Image (cartoon, rainbow, N blue to C red):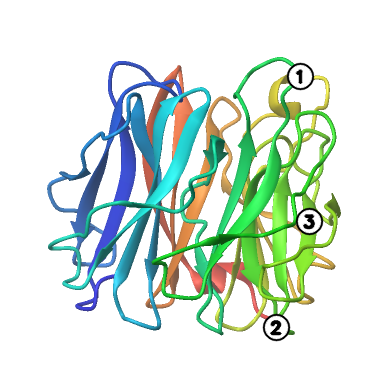
Amino acid sequence: MLQDGSLLAAWSAFHGGSRDESTAQITAAISRDGGRTWGTPFRLQENIGRQNVMSVSFLRSRKSGEILFFFLVKNSEEDLYPVVRRSADEGKTWSPPVRVLRDPGYYVMNNARVIQLRSGRILCPLSFTGTVFAKGQTFRNVVYYSDDDGRTFRRSPSVLTAPRRGAMEPGLLELQDGRVLQIIRTQVGQVWHALSADGGVTWSPAAPWTVAAPESPSTIFRLPDGRVAIIYNPEVRLDSDHSGPRTPLVAAVSPDEGKTWSPYQVIEPDPAATYAYTSVTLHNGRALLTYYYGKNKMYSLRFRSIPLGWFGRP
């Protein structure tokens, strides 16, 4: 959200195909009425990778007030890494991109995953492998952290693993007691998790959590009343592709930091469509969601504005 109340949305605009390696730039648009209407899309980031640029995270730094703009640069099946640019003038101009890491490999960071802790530390949760889709390769999770407002990052010594295809596409939430929760996409029909008691530097081993889900990323966030909410796909079929369909798209709420959950409510019900990779922004009493919508081999970005009352009362 910009300082004048406008909303800035950005997404990977693929052309020449819909695969992960297809050519793409990052396109953006601005809404000045809470998402009811959007201005003309414009190019926010040209393609500086041999394949594409993708997976945007915006973060408004509480230290500097600047907007930090993270995205991935993809060169090959062995070379994918995050960079960050920063703006001190509400997105009118941006600094040159700076690499978050220099380690070799294929590093995935989903859209809208970077968080800033109450201490001011910035955390980037990533999954990585040597060569994506290569036989015998699995994904592992690692967190990079910054204490200088995103100018330099250090790598956590903790590397998290999970069965089958591995630990994938982590998301983070700072708990009320100061610990950090990491949720993990897996191929075993359940979201896994890990905890950090030192601001994301070291982590407990990954273990099963309290939400059943297919091999699809879930998104966790905190409501203004203090409850935790999660958006995910609930259907698990371990003998099918991705361990189950990416439909319906649902939300559930927890009053106890993810130990127990309310019955889920359906956001998107179409069994013939797919929905995943949700981002959430809270604005003026509403949860503003973006996620991909796929049907008949076509994929697009969908925006939805949900009143916070829809999530129920504590």
Residue 300 is situated, as x and y percent measured from the top left of the image, at: 37, 33
Residue annotated with mark 2 = 176
**Which of marks 2 and 1 precedes in the sequence?**
1
- In the picture, the quarter occupied by the C terminus is bottom right
Residue lying at 56% horizontally and 83% vertically, measured from the top left: 118
Whichever of labels 2 and 3 marks the residue nearer the N terminus, that label is: 2
Q: Quadrant of residue 262?
A: bottom right
Choose the circle earlier in sequence order: 1 or 3.
1
Q: Find disc 3 in the rendering and name its residue.
A: 193
Local secondary structure at mark 2: loop
* Callout 2–callout 3 Cβ contact below 8 Å: no
> Real-space Cα distance between discs 1 and 2?
39 Å
Image quarter of residue 86: bottom left
Residue 147, label in figure: none
Residue 275 image offset from top left, x and y in percent: 53, 37
Q: Could you tell me if residue 190 is visible in this image?
A: yes
Type of amino acid at the residue the image marks with label 3: His
247 vs 4, nearest the viewer = 4
Gap in angstroms between the C-alphas marked 2 and 3: 17 Å
Q: Secondary structure at mark 3?
A: strand
Q: Judge left or right: residue 308 versus residue 194.
A: left
Q: Tell which of 83 and 35 is nearer to you.
A: 83
Please tell me which residue is depicted at 72% across the width and 24% down the height of the picture: 137
Q: Give the structural element (helix, strand or loop) at label 1.
A: loop
Mark 1, residues whose alpha carbon is within 10 Å: few (<14), some, or many (≥20)? few
